[in-house]
Image (cartoon, helix red, strand yellow):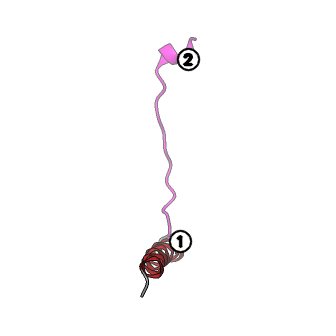
């Protein structure tokens, strides 16, 4: 196998693994919604 072809196959395989991982995360992981509160100091409100 020529070196360039081997390099492109490795890059393509890595890209396919990353794509499959992202697809699995999107498909199988459901985020849990929750309420978020944060106090703002009064010094930042008086500007």
Q: Position of residue 9 (x, y in %)?
A: 46, 81
Of 36 and 20, nearer the camera is 20
Disc on res. 34: none
Whether residue 23 is visible here, answered yes or no, is yes
Quarter of the image where one finds residue 6 = bottom left
Q: Position of residue 25 (x, y in %)?
A: 48, 72
Of 7 and 20, nearer the camera is 7
Disc on res. 45: 2
Please tell me whether mark 2 sits on a helix, a strand or a loop. Answer: helix
Taking the spot 48% from the left edge, 14% from the top edge, the residue there is 43
Quarter of the image with the N terminus is bottom left
Taking the spot 56% from the left edge, 17% from the top edge, the residue there is 45
Figure check: 41 above or below 9: above
Please state the extent of the stretch shown in magenta in the rendering: 30-47
Q: Earlier in the sequence, mark 2 or mark 1?
A: 1
Q: Is 43 included in the stretch rendered in magenta? A: yes
Figure check: 22 above or below 5: above
Residue tagged 1:
26
Q: Residues within 10 Å of mark 2 (few under 14, many from 20)?
A: few
Q: Residues within 10 Å of mark 1 (few under 14, many from 20)?
A: few
């Amino acid at each position: 196998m020529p070196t360039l072809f081997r390099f492109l196959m490795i890059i393509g395989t890595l890209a396919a693994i990353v794509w499959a991982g992202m697809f699995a995360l999107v498909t199988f992981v459901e985020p849990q919604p929750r309420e978020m509160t944060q106090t703002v100091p009064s010094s930042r409100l008086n500007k």
